[in-house]
Amino acid sequence: MLEYLENIIGNINNVLWGPPMLILLFGTHIFMTIRTGIIQRKTLKGIKLSVTKDKDSDGDISQFGALATALASTIGTGNIIGVGTAIALGGPGAVLWCWLTGVFGIATKYAESLIAVKYRVKTKDGRMMGGAMYALERGLHMKWLGVLFAIFALAASFGIGSMVQTNAIAGIWEENMNVPGWIIGVVCGIFVFLVVFGGVKKIAGVCEKLVPVMAGFYVIGCIFILVVNYDYIIPAIVTIVKLAFKPGAAAGGLVGSGVMLAARYGIARGLFSNESGMGSAPIVAAAAQTKNPVRQALISATGTFWDTVVVCAMTGIVLVSSILKNPDIDVSNITDGSELTSLAFGQIPYIGKAILVIGIVAFAFSTTLGWAYYGERCAEYLGGMKIIIPYRILYVASVVIAPLITLQIVWSLADTFNALMAVPNLIAVLLLSKVVRSETDKYLNNMDLKAEDEIPTVDK
Protein backbone atom coordinates (compact mmCIF):
# COMPACT_ATOMS: atom_id res chain seq x y z
CA MET A 1 0.00 0.00 0.00
CA LEU A 2 2.76 2.44 0.97
CA GLU A 3 4.74 1.55 -2.13
CA TYR A 4 1.67 2.17 -4.29
CA LEU A 5 1.14 5.56 -2.61
CA GLU A 6 4.79 6.47 -3.12
CA ASN A 7 4.49 5.67 -6.83
CA ILE A 8 1.39 7.87 -7.20
CA ILE A 9 3.00 10.82 -5.42
CA GLY A 10 6.20 10.26 -7.38
CA ASN A 11 4.32 10.41 -10.69
CA ILE A 12 2.58 13.63 -9.61
CA ASN A 13 5.94 15.17 -8.72
CA ASN A 14 7.41 14.12 -12.05
CA VAL A 15 4.78 16.35 -13.65
CA LEU A 16 4.91 19.19 -11.12
CA TRP A 17 8.71 19.32 -11.10
CA GLY A 18 9.11 18.81 -14.84
CA PRO A 19 10.69 21.34 -17.22
CA PRO A 20 7.76 23.84 -17.05
CA MET A 21 8.11 24.26 -13.28
CA LEU A 22 11.88 24.51 -13.41
CA ILE A 23 11.62 27.14 -16.15
CA LEU A 24 8.91 29.09 -14.27
CA LEU A 25 10.83 29.10 -10.99
CA PHE A 26 14.35 29.72 -12.25
CA GLY A 27 13.03 32.03 -14.98
CA THR A 28 11.27 34.16 -12.35
CA HIS A 29 14.50 34.36 -10.36
CA ILE A 30 16.39 35.64 -13.41
CA PHE A 31 13.58 37.98 -14.54
CA MET A 32 13.26 39.59 -11.09
CA THR A 33 17.04 39.93 -10.87
CA ILE A 34 16.91 42.03 -14.04
CA ARG A 35 13.64 43.81 -13.08
CA THR A 36 15.03 44.96 -9.72
CA GLY A 37 18.34 46.12 -11.19
CA ILE A 38 20.26 43.20 -9.65
CA ILE A 39 18.98 43.66 -6.12
CA GLN A 40 21.57 41.11 -4.93
CA ARG A 41 24.10 43.96 -4.88
CA LYS A 42 22.16 45.44 -1.94
CA THR A 43 22.60 42.34 0.25
CA LEU A 44 25.01 44.08 2.63
CA LYS A 45 22.51 46.95 3.05
CA GLY A 46 19.85 44.37 3.90
CA ILE A 47 22.11 42.75 6.50
CA LYS A 48 22.72 46.15 8.12
CA LEU A 49 19.00 46.95 8.14
CA SER A 50 18.19 43.58 9.71
CA VAL A 51 19.81 44.68 12.97
CA THR A 52 18.40 48.23 12.82
CA LYS A 53 15.05 48.89 14.45
CA ASP A 54 12.45 50.84 12.45
CA LYS A 55 11.04 52.79 15.39
CA ASP A 56 7.44 53.95 15.61
CA SER A 57 6.35 51.71 12.74
CA ASP A 58 3.28 49.51 12.50
CA GLY A 59 3.86 45.80 12.99
CA ASP A 60 3.61 42.89 15.41
CA ILE A 61 7.30 41.95 15.69
CA SER A 62 10.68 43.52 15.02
CA GLN A 63 12.34 43.39 11.62
CA PHE A 64 14.97 41.02 12.99
CA GLY A 65 12.24 38.95 14.62
CA ALA A 66 10.56 38.54 11.24
CA LEU A 67 13.88 37.59 9.60
CA ALA A 68 14.73 35.17 12.42
CA THR A 69 11.34 33.48 12.12
CA ALA A 70 11.76 33.21 8.35
CA LEU A 71 15.30 31.88 8.75
CA ALA A 72 14.08 29.46 11.39
CA SER A 73 11.66 28.00 8.87
CA THR A 74 14.24 27.81 6.07
CA ILE A 75 17.55 26.95 7.76
CA GLY A 76 16.53 23.41 8.59
CA THR A 77 16.65 19.93 7.21
CA GLY A 78 16.70 21.38 3.69
CA ASN A 79 20.24 22.57 4.40
CA ILE A 80 21.41 19.29 5.94
CA ILE A 81 19.24 16.35 4.90
CA GLY A 82 17.87 18.08 1.80
CA VAL A 83 21.29 18.77 0.26
CA GLY A 84 22.34 15.20 0.98
CA THR A 85 19.15 13.91 -0.66
CA ALA A 86 19.75 16.13 -3.71
CA ILE A 87 23.27 14.71 -4.09
CA ALA A 88 22.09 11.13 -3.63
CA LEU A 89 19.28 11.45 -6.19
CA GLY A 90 20.65 14.02 -8.64
CA GLY A 91 24.39 13.63 -8.23
CA PRO A 92 26.95 16.14 -6.93
CA GLY A 93 25.95 18.53 -9.74
CA ALA A 94 22.68 19.19 -7.90
CA VAL A 95 24.66 21.28 -5.41
CA LEU A 96 25.45 23.87 -8.09
CA TRP A 97 21.80 24.15 -9.14
CA CYS A 98 20.81 24.45 -5.49
CA TRP A 99 23.34 27.27 -5.04
CA LEU A 100 22.30 29.09 -8.22
CA THR A 101 18.69 28.87 -7.07
CA GLY A 102 19.78 30.76 -3.98
CA VAL A 103 21.85 33.41 -5.76
CA PHE A 104 19.12 34.35 -8.23
CA GLY A 105 16.38 33.55 -5.71
CA ILE A 106 17.43 36.56 -3.62
CA ALA A 107 15.61 38.74 -6.15
CA THR A 108 12.41 36.68 -5.97
CA LYS A 109 12.50 36.67 -2.16
CA TYR A 110 12.88 40.45 -2.27
CA ALA A 111 9.96 40.85 -4.66
CA GLU A 112 7.54 38.52 -2.89
CA SER A 113 8.32 40.09 0.48
CA LEU A 114 7.85 43.59 -0.94
CA ILE A 115 4.34 42.89 -2.25
CA ALA A 116 3.45 41.07 0.98
CA VAL A 117 4.20 44.24 2.98
CA LYS A 118 2.73 46.51 0.32
CA TYR A 119 -0.66 44.79 0.39
CA ARG A 120 -0.83 43.80 4.06
CA VAL A 121 -3.85 44.69 6.17
CA LYS A 122 -4.48 45.37 9.85
CA THR A 123 -7.17 43.53 11.79
CA LYS A 124 -9.50 45.40 14.15
CA ASP A 125 -7.49 44.12 17.11
CA GLY A 126 -4.28 45.56 15.61
CA ARG A 127 -2.61 42.44 14.15
CA MET A 128 -0.84 42.56 10.77
CA MET A 129 -1.92 40.09 8.07
CA GLY A 130 -0.15 39.68 4.75
CA GLY A 131 1.32 37.31 2.21
CA ALA A 132 0.69 36.15 -1.33
CA MET A 133 -3.02 35.65 -0.66
CA TYR A 134 -3.46 39.35 0.17
CA ALA A 135 -1.26 40.45 -2.73
CA LEU A 136 -3.39 38.36 -5.10
CA GLU A 137 -6.63 39.65 -3.59
CA ARG A 138 -5.78 43.34 -3.15
CA GLY A 139 -3.12 43.85 -5.80
CA LEU A 140 -4.54 41.75 -8.63
CA HIS A 141 -8.19 41.32 -7.55
CA MET A 142 -7.78 37.54 -7.88
CA LYS A 143 -9.12 36.37 -4.54
CA TRP A 144 -9.84 32.89 -5.92
CA LEU A 145 -6.13 32.44 -6.58
CA GLY A 146 -5.33 33.82 -3.14
CA VAL A 147 -7.63 31.18 -1.66
CA LEU A 148 -5.83 28.46 -3.63
CA PHE A 149 -2.47 29.70 -2.36
CA ALA A 150 -3.73 29.65 1.22
CA ILE A 151 -5.06 26.09 0.81
CA PHE A 152 -1.80 24.82 -0.67
CA ALA A 153 0.31 26.65 1.93
CA LEU A 154 -1.87 25.29 4.72
CA ALA A 155 -1.31 21.76 3.40
CA ALA A 156 2.41 22.46 2.94
CA SER A 157 2.72 23.45 6.60
CA PHE A 158 1.99 19.85 7.53
CA GLY A 159 4.58 18.59 5.03
CA ILE A 160 7.63 20.82 4.87
CA GLY A 161 6.71 22.42 8.19
CA SER A 162 5.98 19.67 10.67
CA MET A 163 6.22 16.13 9.32
CA VAL A 164 9.46 16.41 7.35
CA GLN A 165 11.18 18.14 10.26
CA THR A 166 10.04 15.72 12.97
CA ASN A 167 10.73 12.75 10.72
CA ALA A 168 14.28 14.04 10.24
CA ILE A 169 14.77 14.52 13.98
CA ALA A 170 13.49 11.01 14.69
CA GLY A 171 15.61 9.48 11.92
CA ILE A 172 18.84 11.07 13.10
CA TRP A 173 18.17 10.13 16.74
CA GLU A 174 17.34 6.54 15.85
CA GLU A 175 20.42 6.23 13.64
CA ASN A 176 22.88 7.83 16.04
CA MET A 177 21.34 7.43 19.50
CA ASN A 178 19.06 4.37 19.12
CA VAL A 179 16.03 6.27 20.47
CA PRO A 180 12.66 4.97 19.15
CA GLY A 181 10.95 7.35 16.74
CA TRP A 182 7.62 7.44 18.56
CA ILE A 183 9.31 8.81 21.68
CA ILE A 184 10.87 11.62 19.63
CA GLY A 185 7.47 12.40 18.13
CA VAL A 186 5.86 12.79 21.54
CA VAL A 187 8.68 14.94 22.93
CA CYS A 188 8.68 17.21 19.87
CA GLY A 189 4.89 17.50 20.07
CA ILE A 190 5.07 18.71 23.65
CA PHE A 191 7.65 21.41 22.91
CA VAL A 192 5.86 22.58 19.76
CA PHE A 193 2.60 22.78 21.72
CA LEU A 194 4.19 25.00 24.39
CA VAL A 195 5.54 27.49 21.84
CA VAL A 196 2.87 27.49 19.13
CA PHE A 197 0.03 28.19 21.55
CA GLY A 198 1.90 31.32 22.64
CA GLY A 199 1.30 33.08 19.30
CA VAL A 200 3.59 34.90 16.86
CA LYS A 201 5.46 36.92 19.49
CA LYS A 202 6.34 33.76 21.37
CA ILE A 203 7.44 32.04 18.15
CA ALA A 204 9.52 35.05 17.07
CA GLY A 205 11.07 35.35 20.53
CA VAL A 206 12.24 31.73 20.52
CA CYS A 207 13.52 32.00 16.94
CA GLU A 208 15.48 35.21 17.62
CA LYS A 209 17.45 33.36 20.32
CA LEU A 210 17.71 29.98 18.61
CA VAL A 211 18.66 30.88 15.02
CA PRO A 212 22.04 32.62 15.60
CA VAL A 213 23.19 29.93 18.03
CA MET A 214 22.16 26.94 15.93
CA ALA A 215 23.56 28.39 12.69
CA GLY A 216 26.89 29.21 14.31
CA PHE A 217 27.08 25.77 15.90
CA TYR A 218 26.47 24.01 12.60
CA VAL A 219 28.84 26.21 10.58
CA ILE A 220 31.66 25.52 13.05
CA GLY A 221 31.13 21.79 12.50
CA CYS A 222 31.23 22.26 8.71
CA ILE A 223 34.41 24.35 8.92
CA PHE A 224 36.08 21.61 10.98
CA ILE A 225 35.26 19.00 8.32
CA LEU A 226 36.49 21.28 5.54
CA VAL A 227 39.77 21.75 7.42
CA VAL A 228 40.10 17.97 7.66
CA ASN A 229 39.21 17.65 3.95
CA TYR A 230 41.24 20.70 2.88
CA ASP A 231 43.04 18.91 0.03
CA TYR A 232 39.69 17.75 -1.44
CA ILE A 233 37.87 21.11 -1.41
CA ILE A 234 38.96 22.20 -4.90
CA PRO A 235 38.34 18.71 -6.41
CA ALA A 236 34.90 18.76 -4.77
CA ILE A 237 34.02 22.12 -6.33
CA VAL A 238 35.28 20.92 -9.74
CA THR A 239 33.18 17.75 -9.42
CA ILE A 240 30.07 19.72 -8.48
CA VAL A 241 30.41 22.08 -11.46
CA LYS A 242 31.33 19.31 -13.91
CA LEU A 243 28.51 16.94 -12.96
CA ALA A 244 25.93 19.73 -13.03
CA PHE A 245 26.00 19.60 -16.82
CA LYS A 246 26.81 16.03 -17.83
CA PRO A 247 26.66 12.41 -16.57
CA GLY A 248 29.62 11.07 -14.64
CA ALA A 249 30.71 9.54 -11.36
CA ALA A 250 32.45 10.68 -8.22
CA ALA A 251 34.37 8.51 -5.80
CA GLY A 252 32.47 5.85 -3.92
CA GLY A 253 30.05 5.16 -6.77
CA LEU A 254 28.05 8.39 -6.38
CA VAL A 255 26.75 9.07 -9.87
CA GLY A 256 25.89 12.31 -11.65
CA SER A 257 22.78 11.72 -13.75
CA GLY A 258 22.95 14.62 -16.19
CA VAL A 259 21.49 18.09 -16.43
CA MET A 260 17.78 17.32 -15.95
CA LEU A 261 18.06 15.23 -12.78
CA ALA A 262 20.77 17.45 -11.30
CA ALA A 263 18.68 20.54 -12.07
CA ARG A 264 15.43 18.97 -10.88
CA TYR A 265 16.71 17.85 -7.48
CA GLY A 266 19.02 20.83 -7.06
CA ILE A 267 16.30 23.40 -7.77
CA ALA A 268 13.66 21.46 -5.83
CA ARG A 269 15.91 21.14 -2.78
CA GLY A 270 17.04 24.75 -3.25
CA LEU A 271 13.40 25.82 -3.12
CA PHE A 272 12.84 23.57 -0.11
CA SER A 273 15.85 25.13 1.58
CA ASN A 274 15.44 28.87 0.93
CA GLU A 275 11.73 28.91 -0.06
CA SER A 276 12.33 31.74 -2.56
CA GLY A 277 9.28 31.76 -4.79
CA MET A 278 7.09 29.74 -2.45
CA GLY A 279 5.57 32.73 -0.71
CA SER A 280 6.07 31.39 2.81
CA ALA A 281 8.55 33.85 4.37
CA PRO A 282 6.59 36.93 3.15
CA ILE A 283 3.74 35.89 5.45
CA VAL A 284 5.85 36.73 8.49
CA ALA A 285 7.61 39.63 6.71
CA ALA A 286 4.18 41.29 6.57
CA ALA A 287 4.05 41.25 10.38
CA ALA A 288 7.31 43.21 10.76
CA GLN A 289 7.56 46.72 12.15
CA THR A 290 8.61 48.66 9.06
CA LYS A 291 7.74 52.01 7.50
CA ASN A 292 7.83 50.91 3.88
CA PRO A 293 7.89 47.67 1.88
CA VAL A 294 11.43 48.03 0.54
CA ARG A 295 13.12 48.02 3.96
CA GLN A 296 11.61 44.71 4.98
CA ALA A 297 12.02 43.25 1.49
CA LEU A 298 15.77 43.89 1.62
CA ILE A 299 15.94 42.29 5.05
CA SER A 300 13.92 39.27 3.97
CA ALA A 301 16.14 38.78 0.91
CA THR A 302 19.17 38.29 3.17
CA GLY A 303 17.50 35.13 4.45
CA THR A 304 18.06 33.45 1.08
CA PHE A 305 21.68 34.62 1.10
CA TRP A 306 22.41 33.09 4.51
CA ASP A 307 20.37 29.98 3.90
CA THR A 308 21.49 28.84 0.45
CA VAL A 309 24.41 30.93 -0.74
CA VAL A 310 26.27 30.27 2.53
CA VAL A 311 24.92 27.31 4.51
CA CYS A 312 23.73 25.05 1.65
CA ALA A 313 26.90 25.65 -0.35
CA MET A 314 29.01 24.81 2.67
CA THR A 315 27.00 21.62 3.29
CA GLY A 316 27.34 20.54 -0.35
CA ILE A 317 31.12 20.99 -0.37
CA VAL A 318 31.39 19.15 2.95
CA LEU A 319 29.46 16.16 1.62
CA VAL A 320 31.16 15.90 -1.78
CA SER A 321 34.66 16.42 -0.35
CA SER A 322 33.95 13.70 2.22
CA ILE A 323 32.92 11.30 -0.54
CA LEU A 324 36.08 12.05 -2.51
CA LYS A 325 38.24 11.60 0.55
CA ASN A 326 36.66 8.26 1.48
CA PRO A 327 36.29 6.32 -1.80
CA ASP A 328 36.18 3.03 0.11
CA ILE A 329 32.73 3.95 1.46
CA ASP A 330 30.08 2.57 -0.87
CA VAL A 331 27.42 5.23 -1.30
CA SER A 332 26.00 3.88 -4.56
CA ASN A 333 22.87 2.58 -2.82
CA ILE A 334 22.30 5.57 -0.57
CA THR A 335 19.11 7.51 -1.34
CA ASP A 336 18.63 8.95 2.16
CA GLY A 337 20.35 12.28 2.71
CA SER A 338 20.66 11.66 6.45
CA GLU A 339 22.94 8.66 5.85
CA LEU A 340 25.24 10.71 3.62
CA THR A 341 25.35 13.54 6.14
CA SER A 342 26.04 11.14 9.02
CA LEU A 343 29.01 9.71 7.10
CA ALA A 344 30.46 13.19 6.61
CA PHE A 345 30.06 14.32 10.23
CA GLY A 346 31.43 10.98 11.42
CA GLN A 347 34.85 12.38 10.49
CA ILE A 348 34.76 14.67 13.51
CA PRO A 349 36.30 12.68 16.39
CA TYR A 350 34.13 12.00 19.42
CA ILE A 351 31.63 14.84 18.95
CA GLY A 352 30.78 14.52 15.24
CA LYS A 353 27.51 12.69 15.79
CA ALA A 354 26.57 15.00 18.65
CA ILE A 355 27.07 18.10 16.46
CA LEU A 356 24.89 16.60 13.72
CA VAL A 357 22.18 15.47 16.10
CA ILE A 358 22.02 18.77 17.98
CA GLY A 359 22.20 20.76 14.73
CA ILE A 360 19.35 18.87 13.07
CA VAL A 361 17.21 18.98 16.19
CA ALA A 362 17.65 22.75 16.53
CA PHE A 363 17.21 23.42 12.81
CA ALA A 364 14.19 21.19 12.41
CA PHE A 365 12.48 22.37 15.59
CA SER A 366 12.82 26.02 14.59
CA THR A 367 11.49 25.23 11.11
CA THR A 368 8.46 23.59 12.69
CA LEU A 369 7.78 26.77 14.68
CA GLY A 370 8.11 29.09 11.69
CA TRP A 371 5.77 27.02 9.53
CA ALA A 372 3.23 26.82 12.33
CA TYR A 373 2.86 30.59 11.99
CA TYR A 374 2.59 30.41 8.18
CA GLY A 375 -0.09 27.75 8.35
CA GLU A 376 -1.98 29.60 11.06
CA ARG A 377 -2.14 32.80 9.00
CA CYS A 378 -3.40 30.85 5.99
CA ALA A 379 -5.98 29.10 8.14
CA GLU A 380 -7.19 32.46 9.45
CA TYR A 381 -7.40 33.84 5.91
CA LEU A 382 -9.60 30.91 4.91
CA GLY A 383 -11.80 30.54 7.97
CA GLY A 384 -11.22 33.38 10.42
CA MET A 385 -10.14 33.26 14.07
CA LYS A 386 -12.39 30.31 14.88
CA ILE A 387 -10.19 27.94 12.89
CA ILE A 388 -6.89 28.79 14.58
CA ILE A 389 -7.21 26.52 17.65
CA PRO A 390 -8.27 23.45 15.60
CA TYR A 391 -5.36 24.12 13.25
CA ARG A 392 -2.87 24.29 16.14
CA ILE A 393 -4.17 21.00 17.53
CA LEU A 394 -3.87 19.27 14.14
CA TYR A 395 -0.40 20.72 13.66
CA VAL A 396 0.85 19.37 16.97
CA ALA A 397 -0.76 15.99 16.18
CA SER A 398 1.09 15.85 12.84
CA VAL A 399 4.35 16.41 14.69
CA VAL A 400 3.63 13.46 16.96
CA ILE A 401 2.74 10.97 14.21
CA ALA A 402 5.42 12.06 11.68
CA PRO A 403 8.09 9.52 12.80
CA LEU A 404 5.65 6.67 12.03
CA ILE A 405 5.51 7.61 8.32
CA THR A 406 8.24 6.65 5.84
CA LEU A 407 10.69 9.41 4.95
CA GLN A 408 10.21 9.09 1.18
CA ILE A 409 6.45 9.67 1.36
CA VAL A 410 6.93 12.69 3.63
CA TRP A 411 9.53 14.29 1.35
CA SER A 412 7.45 13.56 -1.75
CA LEU A 413 4.33 15.14 -0.26
CA ALA A 414 6.38 18.16 0.77
CA ASP A 415 7.65 18.55 -2.80
CA THR A 416 4.08 18.32 -4.12
CA PHE A 417 2.66 21.09 -1.96
CA ASN A 418 5.79 23.23 -2.34
CA ALA A 419 5.21 23.26 -6.09
CA LEU A 420 1.46 23.87 -5.79
CA MET A 421 1.83 26.90 -3.53
CA ALA A 422 4.72 28.28 -5.56
CA VAL A 423 2.65 28.64 -8.74
CA PRO A 424 0.08 31.24 -7.52
CA ASN A 425 2.81 33.06 -5.61
CA LEU A 426 5.01 33.31 -8.70
CA ILE A 427 2.01 34.57 -10.67
CA ALA A 428 1.61 37.37 -8.09
CA VAL A 429 5.31 38.23 -8.27
CA LEU A 430 5.38 38.36 -12.08
CA LEU A 431 2.11 40.27 -12.53
CA LEU A 432 3.06 42.77 -9.81
CA SER A 433 6.66 43.17 -11.00
CA LYS A 434 5.86 46.73 -12.11
CA VAL A 435 4.81 47.55 -8.53
CA VAL A 436 8.02 45.97 -7.25
CA ARG A 437 10.05 48.13 -9.60
CA SER A 438 8.21 51.37 -8.76
CA GLU A 439 8.45 50.78 -4.99
CA THR A 440 12.15 50.00 -5.35
CA ASP A 441 12.73 53.21 -7.30
CA LYS A 442 10.73 55.15 -4.71
CA TYR A 443 12.49 53.98 -1.55
CA LEU A 444 15.81 52.30 -2.27
CA ASN A 445 17.94 55.42 -2.56
CA ASN A 446 16.29 57.11 0.41
CA MET A 447 15.99 54.47 3.12
CA ASP A 448 15.36 57.07 5.87
CA LEU A 449 12.18 58.33 4.14
CA LYS A 450 9.48 58.78 6.78
CA ALA A 451 6.48 58.27 4.52
CA GLU A 452 4.49 55.12 5.22
CA ASP A 453 2.08 53.21 3.03
CA GLU A 454 -1.49 53.30 4.28
CA ILE A 455 -2.49 50.00 5.85
CA PRO A 456 -6.24 49.30 5.65
CA THR A 457 -8.13 47.81 8.59
CA VAL A 458 -10.25 44.76 7.84
CA ASP A 459 -12.92 42.89 9.76
CA LYS A 460 -11.09 39.68 10.68
Image (tube, rainbow, N blue to C red):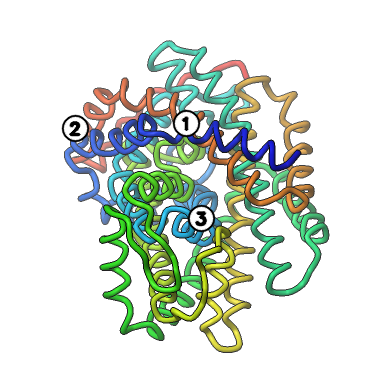
Rounded to the nearest angstrom, the CA distance separating label 2 from label 3 is 37 Å
* Whole-percent x, y for residue 16 in the image: 47, 31
Label 1 – label 3 distance at C-alpha? 18 Å
Q: Which residue is mark 2?
A: 441
Q: For residue 453, which quarter of the picture?
A: top left
**Looking at the figure, which quarter contains the C terminus?**
top right
Q: Which residue is mark 1?
A: 16
- Residue contact between numbered discs 2 and 1, judged by CB atoms under 8 Å: no
Q: Residues within 10 Å of mark 2 (few under 14, many from 20)?
A: some
Q: Could you say whether the residue bearing mark 1 is in a helix, strand or loop?
A: helix
Q: Tell me the element at label 3.
A: helix
When the figure is inspected, residue 121 is found, relative to residue 102, above or below; the finding is above
Mark 1 surroundings: few (<14), some (14-19) or many (≥20) residues within 10 A: some
Spatial separation of the CA atoms under disc 2 and disc 1: 35 Å
The quarter of the picture where residue 242 lies is bottom left
Query: Which residue is at 33% across, 79% downward?
Result: 232
At label 3, the amino acid type is Gly
Residue sitting at x 30%, y 33% = 28
Q: Nearer the viewer, residue 427 or 289?
A: 427
Residue 94 placement (x, y as % from top left): 38, 54
Nearer-N-terminus badge (1/3): 1
Residue 305 place in picture, x, y as percent: 35, 54
Q: Is residue 351 visible?
A: yes
Residue that mark 3 sits on: 82
Residue 257 in the image: state x and y as whole percent: 38, 53
